[in-house]
Image (spheres, rainbow, N blue to C red):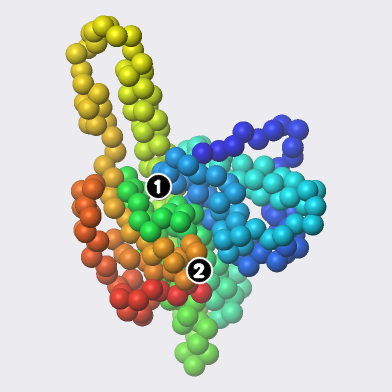
Amino acid sequence: MSLSKPSSVPSASDKEVQALLLRYRCPTPLHAVRTLLLGHIASPRMDVSPMAPVAQAWGGELPEFASSDEVEEVMRVLVQGLWNRLSEHQSTRTPFRLPRFEVTLTRQALHDLALVRAQELKGFVDGLFGAEEEMLLPQKAHEAVEALAELHAMFDGAAVLLADETKPAPVHELKALLRNLQQMTIVADEQINKAMQSCKRARGQRLETMATVMSRRFAGAGVEDSAGQDVTALDDHEPEFIESPLSQSVTRNGVSGWRSMGTPRSAGSSRSLTPRTPRMCGMSTSRPIIWH
């Protein structure tokens, strides 16, 4: 899913990306834009384009540009720069890590950390699903999305609690919470990379199957297949896909509803999976969860 990066075009730094987002008043913060693009790169869909998440970062439509030079700048910074840098994380040698930063032991600092992590996980899943309400995911990617949904609920719940000044927040509890948030960040890294690798394998297997089918279709008439094997036998090598639903309003309106995955069902099931209440979310499963 990566684009080839021209050697003559230097990769844009995060500082340049941040400056561009501020200049064009992007409503999505850098940390969420980063995971939004990463989710699109990881997606098992075959028709992924970097322009879709770029527009998504501005709420679905790109801002108006005064000149072609401004358009070229956006392409250089966000596509040739950030997108291509993130695409390198498809390799197991360069796994993705959520950015770490120093956090002081205060209520506000921990609130900001929890909020950033919740927004990062939202961005990744928004990108993974794109405009789809639901999609079939490989088993391991499905499991990773389930885990990320629970992690998001915990990060978001922590941010909500810390924002409530009526709740006591003694130093020893803040210290324990910080340690938990750091451990949850490590788990989030693992689940994001698990989803990326699972979807990457699924795309590769799909391409291999498509190539085999096409080569057999165009084989010369009368040429007997020495293996005597029907193309459908390749289905044994296909990954097991799981129906993973997600509210469509997430990617279009910024209001999200995790319809949490219940017991995995076989591919092709038309019945929605049973929702369950995310931990620390405190909201009914019958209505969308508001992402902060």
Q: Is residue 277 above or below residue 146?
A: below
Front-lying residue, 11 or 57: 57
Give the residue displayed 74% in from the left and 40% down from the top.
10
Query: What type is the residue that disc 2 sits on?
Result: Asn
Image location of residue 62, percent across then percent down: 65, 58
- Does 42 sit left or right of 56 as displayed? left
| Secondary structure of the residue carrying numbered label 2 | helix
> Mark 2 Cα within 10 Å, few/some/many (few <14, many 20+)?
few
Give the residue displayed 31% in from the left and 74% down from the top.
285
Image location of residue 268, percent across then percent down: 23, 48
Q: CA distance from mark 1 to mark 2?
A: 28 Å
Confirm whether residue 208 shows in the render: yes
Confirm whether residue 147 shows in the render: no
Image location of residue 251, percent across then percent down: 48, 62
Q: Is residue 116 above or below residue 91?
A: below
Name the residue beneath numbered marker 1. Answer: 194
Image location of residue 152, percent across then percent down: 43, 66
| Secondary structure of the residue carrying numbered label 1 | helix
In primary-sequence order, the first of circles 1 and 2 is: 1
Farthest residue toward the front? 221
Name the residue beneath numbered marker 2. Answer: 253
Quarter of the rendering containing residue 24: bottom right
> Mark 1 Cα within 10 Å, few/some/many (few <14, many 20+)?
many
How many numbered marks, from 0 up? Answer: 2
Farthest residue toward the bottom? 166
Nearer the viewer's eye, disc 1 or disc 2?
A: 2
Give the residue displayed 56% in from the left and 51% down from the top.
52
Q: Identify the mark at residue 256; answer none if there is no mark.
A: none
